[in-house]
Image (cartoon, grey):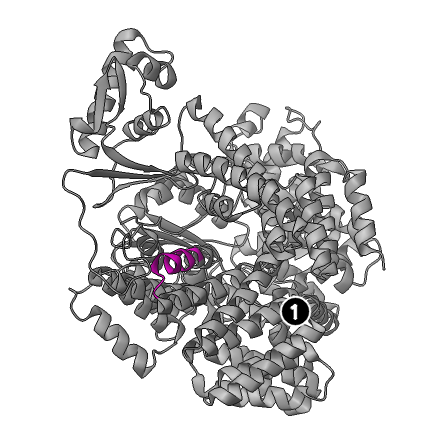
């Protein structure tokens, strides 16, 4: 069985050099080897987060899994556990809390968790930390906070200031951490700045007056563009005289940093100061368009750039887009200024309006789950702002905004697994549904119907769906009425009544949104009803249409869900091999999309498949994982399903406990009992012929090498590479040829030794010397071994498929060959250059086959099938304009003009970014022709 890698959520990328702190890193590292909870404490700006990042970079390789959890933008203590679980890769669940799930999953996994910025959520963080420490003996936690968490066994460690110079010469100042930090940050804004004996005393004074606080020193250094170090030191001195004369009970470092920010703020002009305080309305990161819309300032871009230059705003590049943020200390300071200016209410209102409109405008694009990666990434980046907007609407009684935001976000909550948060917010908003316009209330009720089904509150599905239909019938919104009708059908126990609702829903979608995810959604549930009623012909027709729409749109959930159900249809027909292909294909897509709901639909089918193939232990193992998934999302089995699945696993030993990634990997392994079971009732697995040896290699994409007993375990990489090398040369290879490919710089004697050690290990892994034979000085895999090598089979089958396509137009063989191409040859492996020629040859064959397939389908006017071929080409090479032109043509023929526009904008953006050029004239002309009335 293949074990999926443990989750790793990386440390934030650092864009500046880390200065000093070698002793501190070593000290914290030592503590973490003897203490399971270390909390870095200190004033804001002391460098807690940066020190934690450097410690984490050293420590994480010792652990199987790790996660960096940034709590700065989170305000609700109830969401701390969910955020920690989500960062570790665990989904929302129904039967147990997020912390209980983590304890269950991490009890035997060495895991390093960093909780950053805990100070405003101390109690919630302490509860999560204590529960993890008690329930998971292999979990180690590093926290940053302005105060200790107060958990038993915690080691609080005060982050010290940077080292300061003992004397004021340039050499002494450069020898201190504070001096080196000042110099580097000063050069970032004024490259010509240098430290010499003339200004060194002033730099030393700045470091001492600022108590070695990194943030304060960075803010001071940013002023060298307009002030000499001597002037900076003088201004600080004036500020501190007033500070020292009052407030002696205040912690000095807190006073120092506050006065430093006060001073930095005083140097801003009125426009800069206004924008700075207004930026504090954002939670987490924010975009330029959000700033321009929310902050009533002229020349926002120039002012924002100035604030970035002055180190008051941090700029990051995420997915090609510039995003901004305030350090938490500065955000809190800015919020105090915003309060003093009496602007909080107006800015919070504008903030909530902007983010509500942002998500409402993309509502239909989000429909159906995680479809467009760029949109999903943008929404994930704005989650802190969505929460802040929702909190404001609830606190101020703006029920319309609250309902609109919840209704628009519910598909994003589904895609991200935030089921409980969504349900909580929807329930709070719907308590005031009677006070808002019917359209918004209706949308929120259908969102609640879906979310209720996800969390297992099945008694809430029908009432919310019925209320949604009643409200939406008179609102001239066929999209949401269709959506509501689908969920009313899903919750209706009478099959005939459900049938009528699905027919009405899909009729509305065909009339007002042809070829859309909405239509696919209605067809899916109509198909599920037909499948449950054993009307297999109707189920196959409905689900096939759903699948074709999903493929044309390139929408992963709209592809995978019907594919999974088509697998169930084929299971009921007894077409086991075809069912296996559909179910495994759907499971791969669901797993890649991190869709737990979709995974269990496919896994249930694979459990049935294993039972029908005579593998009860495999069926029981998969069902155990399905049961775990059902519990997590609160979806109980029906009585009939309980009886069926209990019978499937009744004769098997207790299964092993597997995580979801492990279960997916297990379910996707080749099923040795399937061969021979095609088009047949359940039979025992065929016995392997005596003396026959089998070897299966999957090298197109993720590398897998297995024998019938299971995947091979390799002690080192070279023996595996040797096997692949000789398989790529079935005629055999001499020791000298291997040496030239593997050890080109080695001597003859070194090659001889290395080769024989590697060959010995290869034979041992395979099961004996007879697997690799020597004949006429040529080493090769024994010809009596039955080898299934996907690279060889792909090349052979594509050639045959193209020949058949040219001869009689039949695409079947070519389409089957293309399913073998899971990725480039050995794309994730570190191997020698010997594989590059074959990799490029196979890649070119893949591209050529897709082009031929797309052109053939277009010639036959099979636009959805052609679109799938061109879409796969675009996914393979974003710079291939030929593929874009083919796909735009198909979308136009399918009536999807909006998709044509989006695709053209995408190719424009990609070409500009990667090649700094524009689309070819042929592409531009095609686009203009397709978009003309």
* Quadrant (top left/top right/bottom left/bottom right) for the C terminus: bottom right
Q: Quadrant of residue 701?
A: top left
Crowding around mark 1 (Cα neighbors within 10 Å: few <14, some 14 to 19, many 20+) is: some
Q: Which span of residues is magenta-colored?
A: 574-585
Q: What number of labels is visible?
A: 1
**Magenta span has 254?**
no
Which residue in the protein does label 1 denote? 363
Q: Give the main secondary structure, helix, strand or loop, of the magenta stretch.
A: helix
- Between 338 and 174, the residue placed more toward the observer is 338
Which residue is at a point 46% across and 54% down the rendered structure image? 592
- Between 140 and 761, the residue placed more toward the observer is 761
- Between 791 and 487, the residue placed more toward the observer is 791
Task: Tell me where residue 803 appears, x and y as whole percent.
Answer: 53, 37
Left or right: where 818 falls relative to 759: right
Q: Relative to 505, say whether 52 is above or below.
A: above
- Between 440 and 539, the residue placed more toward the observer is 539
């Amino acid at each position: 069985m293949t074990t999926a890698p443990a989750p790793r959520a990386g440390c934030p990328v650092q864009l500046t050099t880390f200065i000093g702190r070698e002793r501190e890193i070593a000290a914290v590292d030592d503590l973490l080897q003897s203490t399971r909870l270390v909390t870095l404490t200190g004033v804001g700006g002391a460098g807690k987060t940066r020190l934690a990042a450097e410690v984490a970079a050293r420590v994480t390789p010792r652990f199987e899994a790790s996660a960096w959890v940034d709590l700065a933008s989170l305000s609700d203590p109830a969401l701390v556990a969910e955020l920690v679980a989500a960062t570790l890769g665990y989904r929302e669940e129904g039967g147990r809390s997020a912390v209980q799930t983590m304890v269950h999953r991490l009890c035997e996994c060495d895991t390093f968790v960093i909780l950053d910025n805990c100070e405003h959520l101390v109690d919630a963080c302490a509860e999560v930390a204590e529960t993890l420490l008690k329930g998971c003996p292999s979990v180690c936690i590093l926290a940053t906070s302005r105060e200790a968490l107060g958990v038993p066994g915690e080691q609080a460690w005060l982050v010290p200031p940077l080292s300061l110079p003992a004397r004021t010469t340039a050499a002494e100042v450069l020898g201190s951490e504070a001096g080196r930090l000042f110099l580097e940050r000063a050069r970032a804004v004024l490259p010509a700045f240098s430290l010499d004996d003339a200004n060194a005393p002033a730099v030393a004074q700045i470091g001492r007056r600022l108590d070695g606080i990194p943030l304060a020193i960075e803010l001071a250094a940013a002023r060298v563009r307009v002030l000499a170090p001597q002037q900076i030191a003088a201004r600080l001195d004036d500020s501190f005289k007033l500070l020292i004369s009052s407030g002696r009970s205040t912690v000095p470092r807190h006073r120092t940093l506050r006065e430093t920010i006060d001073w930095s703020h005083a140097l801003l002009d009125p426009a800069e100061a206004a924008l700075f305080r207004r930026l504090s309305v954002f939670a987490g990161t924010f975009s330029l368009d959000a700033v321009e819309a929310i902050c009533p300032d002229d020349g926002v871009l120039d002012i924002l750039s100035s604030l970035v230059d002055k180190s008051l705003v941090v700029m990051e590049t995420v997915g090609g887009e510039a995003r901004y943020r305030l350090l938490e200390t500065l955000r809190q300071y800015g919020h105090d200024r915003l309060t003093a200016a009496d602007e909080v209410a107006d800015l919070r209102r504008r903030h909530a309006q902007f983010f509500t409109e942002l998500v409402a405008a993309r509502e239909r694009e989000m429909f159906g789950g995680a479809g467009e990666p760029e949109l999903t990434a943008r929404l994930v980046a704005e989650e802190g702002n969505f929460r802040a907007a929702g909190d404001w609407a609830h606190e101020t009684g703006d029920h319309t905004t609250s309902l609109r935001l919840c209704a628009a976000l519910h598909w994003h909550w589904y895609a991200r697994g935030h089921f409980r948060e969504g349900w909580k917010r929807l329930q709070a908003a719907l308590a005031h549904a009677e006070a808002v316009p019917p359209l918004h209330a209706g949308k929120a009720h259908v969102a609640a119907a879906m979310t209720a089904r996800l969390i297992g509150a099945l008694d809430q599905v029908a009432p919310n769906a019925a209320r949604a239909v009643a409200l939406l019938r008179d609102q001239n919104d066929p999209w949401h009425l269709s959506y509501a009708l689908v969920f009313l059908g899903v919750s209706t126990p009478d099959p005939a009544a459900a049938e009528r609702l699905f027919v009405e829903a899909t009729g509305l979608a065909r009339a007002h949104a042809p070829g859309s995810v909405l239509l696919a959604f209605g067809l899916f549930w109509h198909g599920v009803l037909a499948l449950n009623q054993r009307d297999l012909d109707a189920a196959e027709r409905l689900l096939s249409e759903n699948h074709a729409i999903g493929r044309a749109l390139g929408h992963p959930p709209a592809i995978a869900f019907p594919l999974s159900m088509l697998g169930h249809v084929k299971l009921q027909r007894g077409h086991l091999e075809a069912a296996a292909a559909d179910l495994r294909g759907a499971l791969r897509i669901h797993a890649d999309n991190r869709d737990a709901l979709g995974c269990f639909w496919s896994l249930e089918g694979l459990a049935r498949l294993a039972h029908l193939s005579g593998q009860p232990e495999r069926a029981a193992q998969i069902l155990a994982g399905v049961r775990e998934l059902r519990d997590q999302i609160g979806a109980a089995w029906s009585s009939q399903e309980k009886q069926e699945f209990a019978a499937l696993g009744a004769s098997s030993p207790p299964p092993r406990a597997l995580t979801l990634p492990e279960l997916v990997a297990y379910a996707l392994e080749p099923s040795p009992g399937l061969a021979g079971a095609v088009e047949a009732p359940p039979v025992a697995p065929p016995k392997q012929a005596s003396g026959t040896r089998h070897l299966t290699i999957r090298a197109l994409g993720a590398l897998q090498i297995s024998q019938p007993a299971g995947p091979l375990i390799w002690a080192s990489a070279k023996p595996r590479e040797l096997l692949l090398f000789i398989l790529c040369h079935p005629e055999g290879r001499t020791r000298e040829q291997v040496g030239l490919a593997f050890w080109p710089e080695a001597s003859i004697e070194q090659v001889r030794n290395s080769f024989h050690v590697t060959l010995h290990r290869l034979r041992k892994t395979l099961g004996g010397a007879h697997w690799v034979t020597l004949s006429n000085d040529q080493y090769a895999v024994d010809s009596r071994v039955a080898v299934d090598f996907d690279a060889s089979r792909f090349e052979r089958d594509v050639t045959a498929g193209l020949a058949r396509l040219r001869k009689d137009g039949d695409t079947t063989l070519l389409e089957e060959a293309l399913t073998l191409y899971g990725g480039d040859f050995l794309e994730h492996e570190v191997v020698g250059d010997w594989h590059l020629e074959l990799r490029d040859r196979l890649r070119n064959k893949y591209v050529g086959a897709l082009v031929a397939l797309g052109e053939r389908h277009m010639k036959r006017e099979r636009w959805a099938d052609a679109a799938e071929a061109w879409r796969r080409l675009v996914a393979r090479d974003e710079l291939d304009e030929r593929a874009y032109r083919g796909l735009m043509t198909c979308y136009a023929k399918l009536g999807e003009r909006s998709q044509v526009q989006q695709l053209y904008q995408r190719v424009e953006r990609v070409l500009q970014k990667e090649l700094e050029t524009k689309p070819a004239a042929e592409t531009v002309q095609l686009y203009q022709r397709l978009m003309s009335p």
